[in-house]
Amino acid sequence: MLFLQLLASGIQTGILYALTAAGFALIFGATKIFHVAHGATFIIAGYTYYELHQLGVWWPWATLAAFATAIAFGVAMALYVYRPIQRSEGSFFTVFVAAFGVSISVQSLVQYFFGRGSVTVSTPLTMARETLPDLYLAPILAVSIVVAAVVFACVVLFLDRRNAGLGLRALSENPALLESFGLDSRRLTILAFVIGSALVVPAAIFTAVSIGIQPASGHRVMLISLAATIVGGIGSLRGAALAGLLLGVVENLVITVVDTQWSEAVSFLVLFAFIMFRPHGIFGMAVKK
Amino acid sequence: QSYTLGTLFPMSGPNAEAGAIYSNAVDLALKHLEDDKWLKGKISVKPTDSLGTPQGGAVGMSRLVNVEKVPYALVGFTGVSKAAAPIGDRAKVLMVNGGAVGPDLASLSRYFWNIIPLANQEVEFLIPWLGEQKIKRIATIYVDDPLGQGILSELKKGLPGVGGELVSSYSVTPDLQQFSPIIARLRNDNPEVIYIASPNITQISHIIKQVRDGGLNTQLITYGVANFPSISKLPESDGLIFTSQAADWASSEPTMKRFVDDWRKAYGTEPTTYGLNYYNGALLYGYLLRGLEQAGKPATGANLLEELERVGKYSLAGGEARFRDSTVTTAMQINRIKNGVTEKIK
Amino acid sequence: MSNVLLSMRGVSISFGGLAAVQSVDMDLQEGIVTALAGPNGAGKTTLFNLITGNLPASSGQISLRGKSILGLRPHQIAGMGIARSFQDLRLFTHMTVRDNVLVAIEPSSWLWQPGGRAAQRERMRRVDEALEQTGLAGMADSRAIDLSYAETKFLSLARIIATGSRIWLLDEPASGLDVNSRTRFISLLRDATRRGVTICLIEHNLDVMTEIADRIAFLDRGRKLAEDVPEKVLRDPELISIYFGKSR
Amino acid sequence: MTNVEVGLAPAMAVEQLAAGYKGRNVFEGLSLKLYTNEVLCLIGHNGAGKSTLLKVLFGLLPHNAGVIRFHGREIKPTPSEMAGHGVSYVPEGRGVFPGLTVKENFALALWSAKIQGQDAERRIGEVLEVLPRIKEFWQRRAGQLSGGQQQMVSIGRAMLAEPSILLLDEPSIGLAPKLFQDLLVPIREYQQKRAMSVLLVEQQVGEAFSVSDRVVVMKSGELIFEGVPGDLADEGKLMGMF
Amino acid sequence: MINYLFSILTLVTIYGIAASSLNVLVGYAGIFSVAHAIFFGIGAYTGAQFALLVSPDVVLACLAAAATSGVFSLLLAVPALRVRGEYFVAAALGLQMVGVTVFSEAHALTGGHGGLVGIPPATLFGMDVSSPGAFLLVCALMLALVLYAIRRLMRLSFGRALMSIRDNETAAESFGKNVPKLKTLAMFVGCAFAGVAGTLFAFNLMFVNVESFTFEQSILMLAMVVIGGVGTLSGPLIGAIVLLSLPALLSFIPFIPPTEIGTVQQFIYGALMTLLMIFRPSGIAGKL
Ligand SMILES: Nc1ncnc2c1ncn2[C@@H]1O[C@H](COP(=O)(O)OP(=O)(O)OP(=O)(O)O)[C@@H](O)[C@H]1O
Ligand SMILES: Nc1ncnc2c1ncn2[C@@H]1O[C@H](COP(=O)(O)OP(=O)(O)OP(=O)(O)O)[C@@H](O)[C@H]1O
Ligand SMILES: [Mg+2]
Ligand SMILES: [Mg+2]
């Protein structure tokens, strides 16, 4: 039973990771931008929802607003931070440091306006009940599974049907060539940021509801997303999602065998092991020489 | 004549909530000293941000010592205190900690004093009560730092004496936010009480919420940190028991009453022991300075220390405080949170 | 047959199901220019990669002066005097032109300067000489990324000239060059052969091929179909129909 | 010569054009006309500015002065707009996405030209007729193809849009001579069938001239010669121009 | 005031060494490490333990730390030989996260979260050099030494070989560069210098614990390199000066409410980082 219980909490955690990781993976896969401010998107979405919820706004409106702010932030990053840097041929690390600076600023802004502590949205959805003998499950688990499934289905369908997925892959390989094909690489970049940023919104709301968020949470979100993106294989959306799920489950199950303080490090050991023994990840293509 | 008081609190980062409360307490105390015309001179605060990290602490302390040239500094947080102590010690600055409770803070330096009872004292006080309540099975979630280790070793040492047993202990990293797997295991361990020992306020509130969400109704116990609103105001904290230094908010003792009333008025929140300690820490400075003024001595760290060691006891808010061996000894109490209000149960 | 420097016997490799190179036998003779021709995808570049150790041969034997070099790492093979260029050039884009050449000739596996100052001066002299020959002396201090197309081609050659290697493997070194540059390029290669350098070059341009090659080896679908002096190969009706077309 | 009237109006023209990189103009005051239904061959030494001109025409590079006209109308080209006008551009070098399969490369071009369904199938069929060898590696990743195979794909995908103007930048690089000839013939046929305009930049002068209607020679950013291929049959004269 | 200046300057020199050593990896060898704080930390712990157990001599402690950090650099060299670019960034990230956990669990060596206290004042050949001025002098000398060493190395064939690998590994190989060996060597040199910086850090604070070796620290060092100018000699030092003096300068701004100082500082700090990158993408000392 302990195993099942841990599996359930692993899936719950894993879904949050999967959603954030998929967003990061999509952006990184398509634009080769190491979007370390992804964690900031998460915080912005989470706090938007929380603050509106506190004001008594009906949850669908709050959710919509969270989508709006998250997407607006992501697109603003693409247009006003990453684009100028890339236009002047800034290196990988220039982008990295710039994005990190934004994360720091966003974190302190949120602290300034909304306080530094952790905030939670209380709902009865998170109360666990004994569903099976000795197995305690909260309704939020079912809700998040359904939401994640629907969200992923929508994204995958959109990318496939509209050829957008193909465009994003091409963008990742050579944006200049994309222009030679007569496609607008700027629009595709924005598209990647829109979808990628939108993907974290459900994760942010679930976190606000089930764990609670604080201005400093963004960091960890970013790290896990990054790890999952690599484990899943760069450029693979479903890889990142699966890896996120896997990391969540591993992190939970592993405490049956190791001391609890190691559980977080285990995710990164998994990452390390993947890089050493299967560097192209679960679904990725071989690393190019 | 004017005096300076240095503060070295985390003003940003995950523990900034604490820094804000500490600063408010200091401001309040200085206002009271001023209103009372307690001193000939005026005390001005020199705030520095410790970022809550050792390096921040070292840089901040160095700034307080070398730029602001304060003779007296209020500090907080274990890592910060440990990094700041040698710097203050070298420059002979009297440092007073009102927030960190790691047991190893007792012996940092002659110039480093704690105006807060350290965690081991709190656990010592709790254990007999557990015996009285016939509580046998105790589990703990702790952060493997001096605080957590101190609490853990006190529990291990004390529990057998009252017929109790530490059934399990889970060590976590200070920034862990997800406790569902630990909660799943705790459910299997079936303890009567779970003791939470973390230096990180946010983390404690995460643990409390997630334990309750996990459908676990075990009694939760923690130390004085539960005085922070983000813990005590959490809906899930209902029923939480915690030890703290004795602080009777309804007391009619004038210093205490003035502190409580003015705190509520100025900040619109309930006062906490942390606020109280830093309020007292600033008051103590006033008292020491007054002693020096009367003796006609300059306000240097060495003189302040001498004065503190000479007098050794002051009547601060909450009663008389005795200072010996770098630490204050105060009465302790056990509290329970009920409907968002903290009530004393012992 | 004169002095065979590099010899390949039954060399093969395949990618998945695709046999990119199939049991190729070929000899490179000292001081002789062999042109490697063949349709696109014939396996020419792959053959180079096999020689230089960038790809592992699945079977066959490659030996340099009688000693097998199979299984050696690329840098070891380079150390034995085989220099190559790449179809996509692969310059050290952010280093200066001079450093691009210098780094190619330095034995640099340790923290100190091998051979001391005297050796370094000698190397600098060789670098300057190579730059002079290729006409790049004027832009020795600009970064490789700022060069024009023709200049990058010449830089890629300068790197090889300076190494003093006796065997050069050149992958389409003259493609895209205009008539003038091409002439200059060919004369550089001629100078080298006069010094006894052995060259194997992949080339699609007939003018270049006929002007410089002593022998032409013809590859198609991984197999060597012919190897002979240009006059014969260029008259082979089969090869004309699959490769050279009507131009001559 | 079916459309004589249209034939007189240039499909694309530039007047007094100036463009370059980082504030330095590669050419200034350049004027050139590309008529409908003609293959115009642009030759010149390395670095003359040929590729730069093509990039400006397709909107990949902004011009600093002068005007660009498309069927007489002044425009400020951007790549997507030019693609919409029926202009296709084959860049210098490997113009394919190495990680995508050949099929996907084609799909991308179709997406760009907003061609779907039946129409798409038909056009793919037509291109494969012109370049039958593509079928051999239709499902393979373009990055694994040999240089020449990639070049074929690159040209094939540009023709998918049934362009009215085709800008070709040194298609011969890396191609076997026979293949290049084989490629030029169908391009020429396709061009005549659809009255397409082709601007062909080449170093393989012999082959290029055999399919060209007109030749211009560029030297250091200036057009120093305009005429028909026959004018330059004499190799010495050509060499002198470089 | 002068002592405060000394303490800031000491930090600048220490971080100057750390950032310069990171620059060997990032700027010259193209190894994108985000785990430099771990090697800084290994050096700090080694130096501290050396001072506690063997001798408080700075130079000896630095040597011991350099050797230890250098040897541990193999942990990172192994993935660096297998993967590149973003993959390596992720591997380094994994090492960083696991390293922090190890630091906080290996109580016997690191004192866990409690850290190591009571590090004795630094001496140099038996002389006490723990006063702010003297220690600054020691640090400055070390910095000069490290910068000189890096400058020499990078002007030698070693540096050029590294840069050629950075620009194109396959081509470097076919010009005789033993890529694994060179990368491992570069890693050793970079991490050993980081160890020196760590030791000085330990002596300076007289206290070390894991909080000084977190991911944020690695990023801080990286930011110094990038903001200063990747692959330039003076860049990392400039970056260290900018990033360390910034909070100090900001703390002198008078009109910010005391309780919000930290937050406002952090905001400005982050914003400046971004703006610098947007307007000077190749760093302050970098070529535009
Ligand atoms: N890494 C690889 N993986 C899979 N297939 C490959 C790889 N490299 C080459 N090939 C295939 O092997 C065959 C030979 O390729 P190679 O590059 O040697 O051709 P080539 O003769 O150099 O052609 P070109 O003249 O066009 O450059 C081609 O069909 C190519 O698709
Ligand atoms: N991206 C660029 N940045 C800066 N300068 C450039 C760039 N591309 C080309 N140049 C310069 O512009 C000039 C013209 O280049 P262009 O590529 O147009 O020549 P070209 O006629 O196509 O030559 P080639 O026959 O070599 O292809 C050259 O001097 C070249 O160095
Ligand atoms: Mg080839
Ligand atoms: Mg060109």
Image: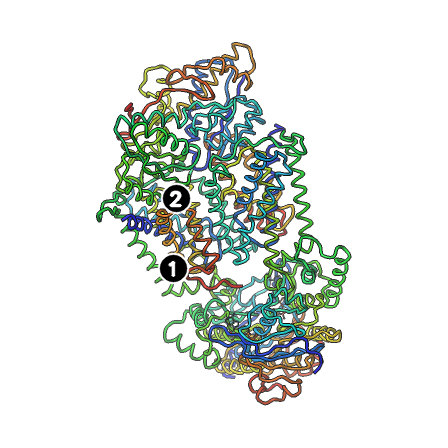
The residues tagged by marks 1 and 2 sit, at their Cα atoms, a distance apart of 31 Å
Mark 2 secondary-structure assignment:
loop
Residue C111 located left or right of residue E217: right
Q: Which mark, residue E193?
A: none
Q: Is residue D151 visible?
A: no
Q: Which mark, residue A238?
A: 1
Instruction: Count neighbours of disc 2 (C-alpha within 10 A) and say few if under 14, some if 14 to 19, many if 20 or more.
Output: few
Work out whether C28 lies above or below D83: below
Q: How is the image coloured?
A: rainbow
Q: Position of residue D109 (x, y in %)?
A: 45, 70
Instruction: Count neighbours of disc 1 (C-alpha within 10 A) and say few if under 14, some if 14 to 19, many if 20 or more.
Output: many
- Looking at numbered disc 1 in the image, what kind of residue is underneath it? Arg
Q: Position of residue C156 (x, y in %)?
A: 66, 67
Beta carbon at label 1 within 8 Å of ligand 1 = no
In this view, the residue in front, D130 or A235, is A235
Tag 1, which chain? A
Work out whether B211 lies above or below B251: below
Q: Which mark, residue A259?
A: 2
In this view, the residue in front, E64 or B141, is E64
At 49% from the left and 25% from the top, the residue drawn is B107
Mark 1 secondary-structure assignment:
helix
Q: Position of residue D90 (x, y in %)?
A: 53, 71
Residue B328 located left or right of residue B69: left
Q: Position of residue A247 (x, y in %)?
A: 39, 52
Residues marked 1 and 2 touching at CB (< 8 Å): no
Q: In the rendered image, which quarter is residue A115 located in?
A: top left
Residue A140 located left or right of residue E91: left
Tag 2, which chain? A
- Looking at numbered disc 2 in the image, what kind of residue is underneath it? Asp
Q: Quadrant of the N terminus of chain E?
A: top right
Q: Earlier in the sequence, mark 1 or mark 2?
A: 1
Work out whether B259 lies above or below E38: above
